[in-house]
Structures are given as C-alpha cells and as structure tokens.
Image (tube, grey):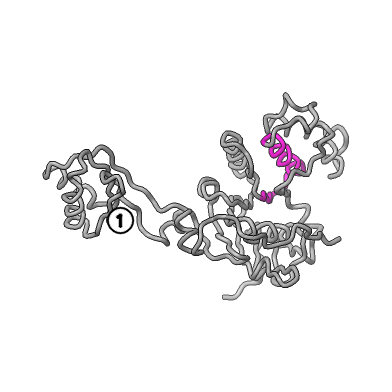
Amino acid sequence: MTTSFSDRTLAVRAEGLVKTFGDNRAVDGVDLRVQAGTVYGVLGPNGAGKTTTINMLATLLRPDGGRAEVFGHDVVREPNIVRQLIGVTGQFASVDETLSATENLVIFGRLLGLSRQDAKAKAALLLEQFGLIEAARRPLKKFSGGMRRRLDLAASLIAQPPLIFLDEPTTGLDPRTRGQMWDTIRALVANGSTVLLTTQYLDEADQLADRIAVIDRGRVVAEGTADDLKASVGTSSLILRLADAGDTTGTLLAIERVLGVRGTVSPEATRVTAPMADADRVADLLITLREEGIHLTEMSVQKPTLDEVFLTITGHDATDQADAAPASEEVPA
C-alpha cells in the first residue's frame, strides 16, 4: 500500500536531499527517517555533508533537490512552522561574549516573544538545569569552552522545541564536559524531545544514538542501530590472554577443533583472538583448555567497533575529509 510522503509520527523525514556548491555536490541524495522521542545520530568525518544536511532540515539552506519534512511540515513550503518546532545548536556558539549568561538567555527569550518576567524566569530555570547558576552574571569571555557549549544548548531550548538539532555539540570539549553534555542530551529525550545529533566521534554515536546514519561524501552509506551496524561487519571476537606464551599452539589447535574457526595471535604472543560465531561453544572451549592444562589470565568478548564499521563500509577511517561545503555558505533570506 502506498502512503503519502507526510508522516507526522516521524520527527524528520527526508528523501533524496541534494545540495550543490558550484561543481561540488556536498549532499548527494540523503534519505533520513527519524522517529519522534529518539536520539538519531548522523555519523561522519568533517566534510561528509552532515552540517549541510542539518542546515537544509533547519530551513537555513534551500535544497537543490529532494524534499524534507519536520513533523509532517515541508521545510521549503512551510519554513515558518518548521522553525517553531525546532531548536538548533551549531558548531560555533551563537551567544554574545560581551554579555552575561543571564543577559544572553533573556535576550533570546524576548526575541521568541516571552515577556520580560517570563524570559527572566526561563533563563534562571535553564541556568540551573545546565549547572551555570554560579556563572550567571559572569561575562561570556570568561567562560570555558564547555560552559559556552552548555549555554548555547540552553539558548536553543528556551522555546522548548520538540526537535533539537545538535551539530557536533561536543567538539573540542574535555572528556568530563563531554560526559556532562551526554547526560544532558539523554535528559532531553527522557523529557520527550527528539534529538538529531551529528558527530564525527564514533564513541558518541555509540553511546547516545538509538539509530545511526553513516554519511560519507554526501551520501548515507549505512543506517541502523549501533548493534545492527556492528553485526553487518562480522561477529564478536573472543579474546584470550594466556598465562604461558608456550601454550599458544595448543590454544590455536583447541580453538580450531572446538569452535571450528582459526584464531590469531597478537605480537606479544600471549593474546589469542578468535571469531565467536556460536557463544554456546565457548564453555566447551574453556573446559578443553583446562583439561589440557592451559591457563588463562584473562578472557573477554569484544564486539566489532563503530571504527571497524566505518572502515569496512567506506574503505577509510573516520578522519577528516576536505570540507564538502565552503565556509562561506550563504543563508537564504
């Protein structure tokens, strides 16, 4: 049965999105389906087309091809409605460095139509939520990078939008502040928001996203849950660390006999890795090793990583590409 393009159960639906800059096809037919109430990760290196895609979905750039909707509203035909439904936190802070955190949030609130009293109340609430109360009156030029990112995210939430675009929200942050931002993103979704998150950090997508689109050179090259994507490149691996390097040959023979697969040995000789297609047979292997007097100091199971997924799917690792879109992208009036 055919259905219309519009589907209001989806926070975002995009089909065949295209954006070109001169001869460069920065986004080349991107399809996305983002369920409401989830975190959707768009994973790829710098220059892959992630930010350009976000800018089209957020009505900041007009698509050259394809179409997209936010909660059933077309981003080209109904941009004003779409803008009421979204919050956008870009890669660079949109706040004013000469003002305090409170002043910035009050100005954003007033611009969104709140009364002065309501804007102040909303600012105080957000500053508390993002752990910025103590720095509320401090000029932003004295803020750390992590504090600025938290304030920028707070500013995008003043109108409590149901859909939040976060474009590489943790770039340049230290591990502790990244962890705080992750907790904030989880809390947003727990409170009913939908988050579309772009990132070049594989661990970030793995930690946060319910589903992930892998984008490379302007195209979605894979899509699914983190586990789906990992399963697509192979099974989990059994890692055995031997007490005695002299047992390596016996261990490899046991792996082949019991598991029916070939193991590999790391350069230090005491670490043996084997594909684990059948988890039930691992117990048989451990019993065999014990019977043969082979002792282990460590055993673990390792799933394929998103790094391996990206390398397998794209043929290169998740390092920066040349920028797909020029820095001087113009925002249409």
- State the image quarter where residue 82 is shown: bottom right
Left or right: 35 in relation to 66: left
- Which quarter of the image is occupied by the N terminus? bottom right
Seen as rendered, the residue at the extreme front is 267
Q: Is residue 315 above or below residue 141?
A: below
Magenta span covers which residues? 146-167
Residue sitting at x 27%, y 51%: 265
In depth, the one of 228 and 259 nearer the eye is 259
Instruction: Identify the residue under disc 1.
Output: 275
Q: Is residue 329 magenta?
A: no
Which residue is located at x 24 percent, y 58 percent?
262
Residue 306: x and y in percent read 47, 53
Q: Position of residue 297 (x, y in %)?
A: 25, 37
Residue 52 point in image, percent of width and height: 70, 60
Instruction: Look at 67% across and 29% down and name the residue there.
Output: 131
Up the image or down, 259 lies above or below 27; here it is above
Farthest residue to the top: give it: 134
Q: Relative to residue 122, is residue 237 depicted above or below?
A: below
Q: Amino acid at mark 1?
A: Pro
